[in-house]
Amino acid sequence: MFSALMRLSLVSRIIIAIILGIGVAVLCPNVAPYLSLLGDLFIKALKSVAPILVFVLVLSSIANFKVGHSAKIKPIMLMYAVGMFLAALSAVVSSMLFPSTLFLDVPAQTDLQAPGSLVQILKNLLLSFVANPVVAISEANFIGILAWAVALGAAFRHSSDSTKAFLTDAATAVNQVIRLVINFAPVGIFGLVAVTFAEAGLSTFESYAQLLAVLIGTMFFVALVVNPIMVAFVTRANPYPLVLQCLRESGITAFFTRSSAANIPVNLDLAKRLGVNESTASVAIPLGATINMAGASVTITVLTLATVNTLGISVDFTTMLVLSVLATISACGASGVAGGSLLLIPVACGLFGISSDIAMQVVAIGMVISVLQDSTETALNSSTDVLFTAAVDRGLD
C-alpha cells in the first residue's frame, strides 16, 4: 500500500493527507493533538532549509544570468518587472478589500508592531541589508540573505566557467534537498490539518476558502485585466485575442504541469506560431521562466498580509507599497523550486518583524492550499512569459 501511495503524484498525496487529517479531526478529535509532532517536524525542516535555499539559488541564478544581445530583451524584462509589481499591487488592493485571517500558533509573549513611518521602514531594510551574512543565515534574516546573495551573485558573474558550474551544481544539490523535504509534505500536512481542524473546527474551511478566493481571484484579475492593459499599451491593438490564446495554449498546460521550466518547450512552440523572432524567444522565454513570477508576487503578498491581519499589525498603504516592491524582488527567486513562492514568504514577513517560526507556519498553510494555488500561479507565470514576449515583438516591429 505504501509503495502504491508513493507512486501517486505529490498533489494526489497532499489531497489524501488533507482528507485523512480532516477525518481524524472530526472522528477522533482526542487523537489529533498527538499528531502535532508530524506538523512540527515538517515546519522545522522547512525552517532549517529555507535560508540556505534562498541564498544559494539566488546567488547561482544571478551569477549565471545572461541577458543576450537582442534589442527586444530589455523591453521584455521591463514588462516582466512592471507586471510583477502591478500583480503585487493588485494583491495589496484585494487583501485590503477582502482581508483574510489564518490559524496560527502565536506565543503569548509575542508583541508585534507596525514598522512605522516610511523612514523607519527604509532604516530597518537598510540595517537588514548590511547584516553579517553568517548571522543572517543563522537567524533567518531573509532580507539580509537576499542582499548578500544578489551582491555575491553579481560579483560571481565575472568568475570562470568552472566556478559558475560549481554554483549551478550547488543550487541543484540544495534543490534536491528541498525536494526531499517537500516529498514529506503530505505527512506534515496530515498532522497540521488534523490538529488545526480539531482545535478550530470546520470553520477553518471558511477561512481557507476565502484565502483561496482572494489568491485565485487576484491572479485572474492580473491575467484578464492588468496584463491586457499592458499588452494594449505596447501593441496599440486589441489585446484579448493574444491574451486568450496564450492562456489557452500555454496556461492550461502549465496549470497541470505546475512547472514554468517544464512549460518552456510549449511556450517556444507557441511563440514560433505567433511569429515571434526566434532569437528573441529563445532568450526571453527561458528568462521569463526564471524571473517572471507575477503569480508568486500575488502569493507572497496575499499570504503576508493575511499573516499581518491575523497578528493585528496595523499597516498603512505606504508600507504595503514597499511590500509590493519586496514581493516583486522576492518572486524573482521563486523559480526552479518546488513551492518556491511559499518558501519566500519569510522574506516579506521580515519587513513587519514577524518571526521565522510564525512565517514557516504560514508556509505550511500555503502547502495545504497549494493544490489550487500553485497550479493557478504557474499558469499565470508561464502564460505571461509568452504573452509579453509576443507583445514586445509585435510592438517593436
Image: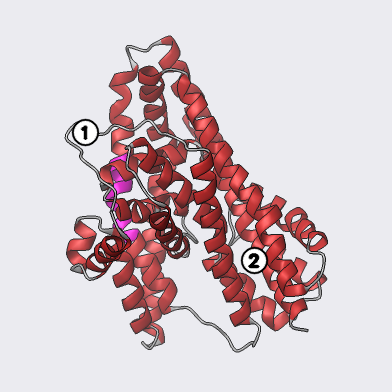
Residue 320, relative to residue 332: is it above or below?
above
Q: Residue at x 36, y 48 (%)?
A: 315
Question: Which residue is pictured at 19% across the width and 65% down the height?
Answer: 134
**Residue 226, image quadrant:** bottom right
Question: Crowdedness of circle 2 by 10 Å Cα count: few (<14), some, many (20+)?
Answer: many
Q: Is 261 rendered above or below residue 48?
A: below
Q: Whole-percent x and y of residue 294?
A: 56, 59
Amino acid type of the residue tagged 2 in the rendering: Asp
Which stretch did the figure color magenta? 43-53
Left or right of 148: which side holds 388? right
SS for callout 2: helix
State whether residue 385 appears in this view.
yes
Whole-percent x and y of residue 255? 65, 49
Q: What quarter of the picture does the C terminus occupy?
A: bottom right
Q: Three-letter amino acid code at disc 1?
A: Pro
Q: Residues within 10 Å of mark 1 (few under 14, many from 20)?
A: few
Q: Nearer the viewer, mark 1 or mark 2?
A: 1
Total number of numbered labels?
Answer: 2
Can the viewer see residue 1?
Answer: no
Q: Earlier in the sequence, mark 1 or mark 2?
A: 1
Q: Secondary structure at mark 1?
A: loop
167 falls in the magenta region: no
Instruction: Place residue 130 in its image quadrant.
Output: bottom left
Q: Residue at x 32, y 11 (%)?
A: 30
Residue 210 at x, y percent in the picture: 54, 33
Q: Which mark is residue 385?
A: 2
Q: Main secondary structure of the magenta part?
A: helix
Along the line of sight, the residue nearer the viewer: 23 or 317: 317
**In the image, which disc is placed on residue 107?**
1
Say which mark, if any, is on residue 380.
none
